[in-house]
Image (cartoon, rainbow, N blue to C red):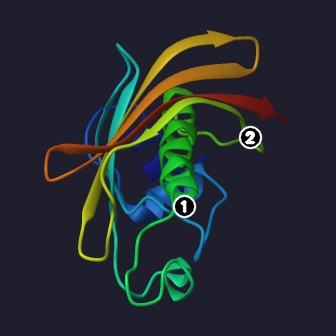
Amino acid sequence: MNEENRSVAQMNGPVAIETIETLIPHRYPFLLVDRVLDWQQEPPTITAIKNVTFNEHFFQGHFPGSPVMPGVMIVEAMAQCAGILGALLANGAMGGNLYYLAKVDNARFSKPVVPGDQLVMTVNETGRRRSMGFFDCRAEVDGQRAASCQIVCAGKR
């Protein structure tokens, strides 16, 4: 782990994209977290953003003339936040660990997410058993819920 990652993992607060890329393996066009605004160890919580632009690859087909961010992409963005939180809680060391989305429960989509929106995601770790993490997730646009769900992520070395 390099010195920057070590210092980021020991404190709460913002995390820039360059550090996010050291914490999870996702890359363009599938990296769906632009910045971590804040995170904390107790209770384990992260708040991050995704700036939604018209240039997103999925808007080419979903839907031409009326672009809407697919719900599965919103869920994936929240799952990436969970992965980032897990890595931060492990002192910034991805260490070859991969976390896979294992389960999604109670997914609700309340408001369309469109180009120009800023998706603010809050993810709380509610439990951990063996290599599995349990998370409550919420995504908002302009303070209004756009989506929510509970997810389970499973770690693999």
Quarter of the image where one finds residue 54: bottom left
Indicate the secondary structure of the residue bearing disc 1: helix
Q: Residue 149 carries which label?
A: none
As drawn, is 39 to the left or to the right of 57? left
As drawn, is 65 to the left or to the right of 141? right
Residue at the (58%, 76%) spot, across then down: 28
Q: Residue 100 carries which label?
A: 2
Q: How crowded is mark 1: few (under 14 residues within 10 Å), some or many (20 or more)?
A: some
Compared with 68, 96 (above or below) is above
- Specify the amino acid type for callout 1: Glu
Q: Percent x, y for residue 86?
A: 56, 31
Depth check: 118 or 62 in front?
Answer: 62
Depth check: 63 or 100 in front?
Answer: 63
The quadrant the C terminus occupies is: top right
Residue at the (63%, 62%) spot, across then down: 26
As drawn, is 45 to the left or to the right of 105? left
Depth check: 125 or 54 in front?
Answer: 54
Residue at the (53%, 39%) spot, across then down: 92
Indicate the secondary structure of the residue bearing disc 2: strand
Q: Percent x, y for residue 16?
A: 35, 59
